[in-house]
Image (cartoon, rainbow, N blue to C red):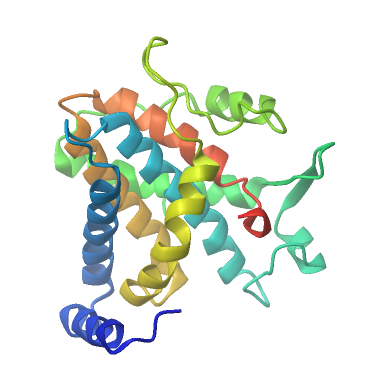
Amino acid sequence: MDSSPERQQWIEQVNLAVAGDRGEGVRLGATSLNQRVLDAIREPQGVNAELLLVTLGALAGFTVQQTLRHLAPGGPLRPGGPEERAAFVVLETADGRRYYHGDPLNRLLFELPESVLGRLWGLAAAAGLGLDRPPDLDELAGHVASTLGLASFGMIRLRTFDEPPLASVETLVRHFWPEWSPDLAVFCPSPEDWLALAAASLVDGLAMARDAVPAADGLRIAMEAALAASKLDPAAL
């Protein structure tokens, strides 16, 4: 972990800006995450809006799993440890890869009012995104489950079939999570706030992308990415 004087100075600046206000930590953290992603994926011709949404959705989904690991009794639960079986249904494919499932993950991702999707819904209304219904979550979950162990797992379906495939959610989480997760803990020291940050990040992403991707399509793309990323094995990353 970076323990340079510059890093310590940045942490002090964030602490001063947040000043114990958890909501401000969520807001500043979401802005920081989105700027990090925009800077990383920006090309000379601009930002691929769908790649932005897939990336933010993937990070939101993996945040859900990490939140569950940290909030579990005796947590944080280490990957591969016997105690994680109380929080997850762990499936292993023929190639030895592990994937995480279970009602607790689904509840934190899209079922509860305080889930990522539940929090997003209220923020989206305030942002005027014009969303009138969530995507078909049963269809999204079924599709993601049908690709477990296949090369197509985590390759998110876009709006048209003539676009080149984007990076997989595993590639995106592998790239962004190691550097982002220490910052996440600075902006939001309590894992109880991580879902709120993920929701705020997604709403801002949907707003930034809506000229290129209608919000309903963008939410479907992001939630498919989140569902896939929530199942990733941290040990494999």
Vertical position of residue 134 compared to residue 59: above or below: above
Asked where in the image residue 216 lies, by quadrant, the reply is: top left
Q: How many marks?
A: 0
Question: What residue is shown at x 46% (from left), y 35% (from top)?
Answer: 167
Question: What residue is shown at x 20% (from left), y 24% (from top)?
Answer: 212
Q: Residue furthest front?
A: 44
Question: What residue is shown at x 67% (from left), y 69% (from top)?
Answer: 77
Quadrant of the image for the C terminus? Answer: bottom right
- Horizontal side of 199 relative to 209 (left or right) equals right
Of residues 146 and 180, which is closer to you in this image?
A: 180
- Horizontal side of 161 relative to 155 (left or right) equals left
**Residue 165 x %, y %:** 44, 23
Vertical position of residue 194 compared to residue 218: above or below: below
Q: Is residue 101 visible?
A: no
Vertical position of residue 75 compared to residue 140: above or below: below
Of residues 231 and 164, which is closer to you in this image?
A: 164
Q: Residue furthest right?
A: 94
Q: Is residue 87 visible?
A: yes
**Residue 113 x %, y %:** 42, 49
**Residue 134 x %, y %:** 39, 29
Of residues 227 and 159, which is closer to you in this image?
A: 159
